[in-house]
Amino acid sequence: MIEIRNCTKKYGELVAVNNLSLTVGKSEIFGLLGPNGAGKSTTIKMMVGLLKQDAGMIKISGYDIAEDPVNAKKILAYIPEKSYIYEKLTAWEYLTFISGLYNLDENIFRNNAEEYLKTFGLYEWKNEIIGNFSLGMKQRLVLTSSFMRTPQVLILDEPHNGLDPKGVRILKDILFRLKNEGATILLSTHIIAIAEQICSRTAIINKGSVAAYGSTQELRHYAKSSDKTLEDIFLRLTSDYET
């Protein structure tokens, strides 16, 4: 699970994240929403160890990401908003490289990599140079490189970028399956409809703090309204928008 307690991150005088606390449980898909500049990306980078918080604590399945980053990252998969991959490698070479970084068993690697390449429609392209791939194909390959590791915790920042509707549907189906198998999943997205469809709980961040979090019904309570959609609740909590 993911546990964030009283985390703060400053850039000079700017408070990007202000005393933020969240918990994401086992077998849960948890949504993270917020307007541009709300602190989502900073929060995610602290969760995966790319930034160190100025105050507070973050644990990944019991491992403190600041104090024990190696063990935390062994069980963690992170899909950034913009992924960088080695485009001069073939798809299979890239997956082999990732497998080596995490010391995956050879048989597990081959079985899982082939399964996800087939699921994402990339198997026939496995020996093609990545630089020849479309944006959507590159995103499917990045997702394959994470899912093939069967991580206990997944942190996904706009994972739908570049995917066509079929790719989005495949991704949703995989996330539901991984959740049912016990994975902890945090999904940050600007596509509110997707968060509403697949997340059991959602946190709305605004100005570095949690404006509210819970189920859609609980968020209605925070918004003090009877809004029917998560989009309406989001807009009410983060702006002067009126319905």
Image (spheres, helix red, strand yellow):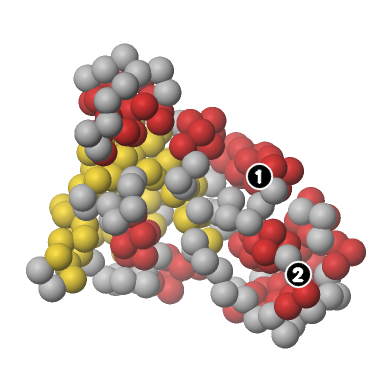
Q: Residue at 69% of width from left, 42% of height from top?
A: 165
Residue 178 relative to residue 82: left or right:
right
Q: Residue 89, how many percent across, how many down?
A: 74, 82
Question: Which sits earlier in the primary sequence, circle 2 or circle 1?
Answer: 2
Label 1 sits on what residue type? Val
Q: Residue at 25% of width from left, 37% of height from top?
A: 239
Badge 1 element: helix
Number of callouts in the render? 2
Residue 9 relative to residue 170: left or right:
left
Q: Residue 216, how many percent across, how many down?
A: 38, 25
Badge 2 element: loop
Q: Is residue 156 above or below residue 180?
A: below
The residue furthest top is 226
Q: Residues within 10 Å of mark 1 (few under 14, many from 20)?
A: some
Q: Residues within 10 Å of mark 2 (few under 14, many from 20)?
A: some
Residue 179 relative to residue 144: left or right:
left
Q: Residue 58, how many percent across, how many down?
A: 29, 59
Disc 2 target residue: 133
The residue furthest bottom is 88
**Could one spot residue 186 in this view of the protein?**
no
Rendered image: mark on residue 168: 1
Q: Residue at 51% of width from left, 33% of height from top?
A: 193
